Image (cartoon, rainbow, N blue to C red):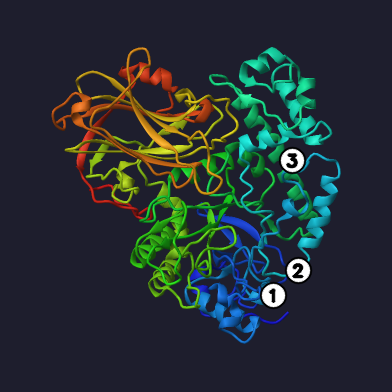
Amino acid sequence: MRATRLLAGFLCFVIVFAPSMPAGACSDFAKAPHSRWTIEREAGAAWLVTPCGDKFFSIGSNVLDGGDRKDGAGARNSYTWSSFYPSLEAWARATRERLIAWGFNSAGAWSLTPERIDLPSTPNLELGRNARFHWFDPFDPATEAEMLRQAERLTKPYRGDPRRIGYFSDNEVGWWNGALFNYFMRAPAANHTKRRLIALLREHYGDDWTRFAADFVAPANAASFDDLLRSEGALAQLRPGGTGIQAVRRWTGVVTEHYYRLVRQALKSVDPEALVFADRLPIYYDPVAVRAMARHVDAIATNYNVDSPDGWLAPYFFDGLRQLAPDKAVLITEWFFAAHENRSGNVNNGHLMTVNSQVERAAGAAQATRNFAAQPDIVGLHWFQWHDHPKGGRSDGEDYNFGLVDSWDVPYAGLVEALKQANREVVDIHRKAASRRGRLPVATTAMPRADIVVGDRSLADWPKPHALVRGVESNAGEIPFGEFYLSWSDAGLGVALIAMDYYDPQILAVDDEFPLGEAFRLELGVDTGTGPQRFALHIVPPKVFPKKGAPAFTARLCRIETGGDCATVDGAATSYFGSDQPRITAEMNLPWPALGLERAPTQAVKLAIGAVAFHRSRWMSWGGRPLDELMADSTGWRRLALGPAVQPSADQVEPRFDR
């Protein structure tokens, strides 16, 4: 194995050396004693550990593969090494040198092998897809042997190479609970997995068809569990008002436990020195799936769509992973920023983080880098991707300015310079991450004054560290699935929500009008001194989902009247701009007259806030009381002072709370 120059001149800020190891111990991976990577914690912060024993924070880029290798790539405006270099090897050498100069030290998914790119690497194997686990018949007895056979084949180029950190088993499986339930409900009776599903339903409902029928609208030809097994191509849909979603969620747990067990078993059998990261979660996670995953992975791999253009990361996302999988490290396997101002002609045609200018892109990406590093469980972050998408989009239509370089191999100078500086700060920030968390406020006693623009589709104008409501809890056995922000101004009371929850368009038996009782909803109780009032902001899905693009969910605000009726709130402004369901982002302003006042109050107000997931599958509230109980008892609402004005902020490294 040829020696690598990977870390020369770079070790001082990317690797933290164990006291017993000489500086530069693994600057030549050819001298590594073995290929085993591990994970350790020091002062509460998680680190990858190289085969030489050095602590390592992985700062990588995805898609280091040389670009489009099909004939006619240049004519398609598609990035390809052959347009700029005499050979793929020359491209790899130059790209590695540029990455190191910009503070990167790793190759993420869809990259050349570590032997060719000469960087510590985390290949994506697509193990489940190759073994036909997903969307076929995962409980077929032959699946286990096929997973092992594919693992042996797919890991062959990487085994024994000390630059191979570990493996992604698949990419963005998602574990969409409704889709997973529907797919196998449609399967024929011969499908082993369909049989497993019907067995679960029998057990869940005590083999009582009447109980099942109270929660589900069965196919027309089904009047028993035996009929349900024999039905093919038909759905059993949730009955509005029922609790069938809990059976759907249990099914997710059964399938994911099976998948992660087979993944670990197969990968550790063929390459025991590699870390198992499993599938890369798709900017969202199902807590049932993560609980199953935690028992079988060395670290959790997740993609992430930054929550605000200024680089803010929603704390609940990482707090939830910590609760579901205590002590597990997290690798950010894909994150990105795009700008409408770009040189490749990208139109940025979807829901992923996009800003207007390259200046905003550089600033937001740099702040997000620092914020990621401030999370003690994170052991690395991999940018998506090396180059822009081709003008007109890639084959699946995705068309984004994600590149560190444009389609002509020219770097976005402002972006790479900002990332270079942020990357140099990563290790120092991360080293202090756990102690910094201990200094964060544990309770919310005041809300900041802030002039929020509802309708700008952004939370960048929020003073987020100060507006964040701390102390949100969920029902037993669950984790908070979002977070709330509160502010005030002369215009009224500001409320924002960042959350995640999945809605499947075929799981609910619904007529022309979507039942609000099945919607995701934020609930708010307010008493300004004129008596308690209740409000609900419903996130309502469209009746028909488009074949392409994101579905257009809408926000419907109600004043909850006696008897539960939904009344219009005069003068209120609402905006739903979820990055893409299942990520949910919304904000609203309730004018003071709607709260019984002519102008902003001069004294504290009493508030209660919480949310209920789609189909009432789980809830969360400030303080942890069940929502119905909390909203009915205004004596338990919390008193919040109206604090001074605070400037918008996304700083999660050293947020100041003395202003």
Tell me which numbered mark, 3 or 2, is placed earlier along the sequence. Answer: 2
- For disc 3, the marked residue is 258
Q: Does residue 437 appear to the left or right of 63 in the view shown?
A: left
- For disc 2, the marked residue is 157
From the viewer's side, name the closer residue of 49 and 554: 554
What residue is rendered at 66% in x and 16% in y? 213
What residue is rendered at 67% in x and 33% in y? 181
| Label pair 3/2, CB-CB below 8 angstroms | no
Residue type at tag 3: His
On the image, the x and y values in percent for residue 476 come to 53, 26
Q: Is residue 211 above or below residue 457?
A: above
Q: Residues within 10 Å of mark 3 (few under 14, many from 20)?
A: some
On the image, the x and y values in percent for residue 35 come to 72, 67
Q: Is residue 603 above or below residue 280?
A: above
Q: Quadrant of residue 487?
A: top left
- For disc 1, the marked residue is 115
| Cα–Cα gap, marks 3 and 2 | 26 Å
| Cα–Cα gap, marks 2 and 1 | 9 Å
From the viewer's side, name the closer residue of 116 and 72: 72
Q: Residues within 10 Å of mark 2 (few under 14, many from 20)?
A: few
Residue that lies at the very extreme toward the bottom in this rendered image: 86
| Label pair 2/1, CB-CB below 8 angstroms | yes
Tell me which numbered mark, 2 or 1, is placed earlier along the sequence. Answer: 1
* Secondary structure beneath label 3: helix
On the image, the x and y values in percent for residue 637 come to 32, 23
Residue type at tag 1: Glu
On the image, the x and y values in percent for residue 482 come to 45, 38
What residue is rendered at 76% in x and 66% in y? 159
Residue type at tag 2: Pro
Q: Is residue 621 visible?
A: no
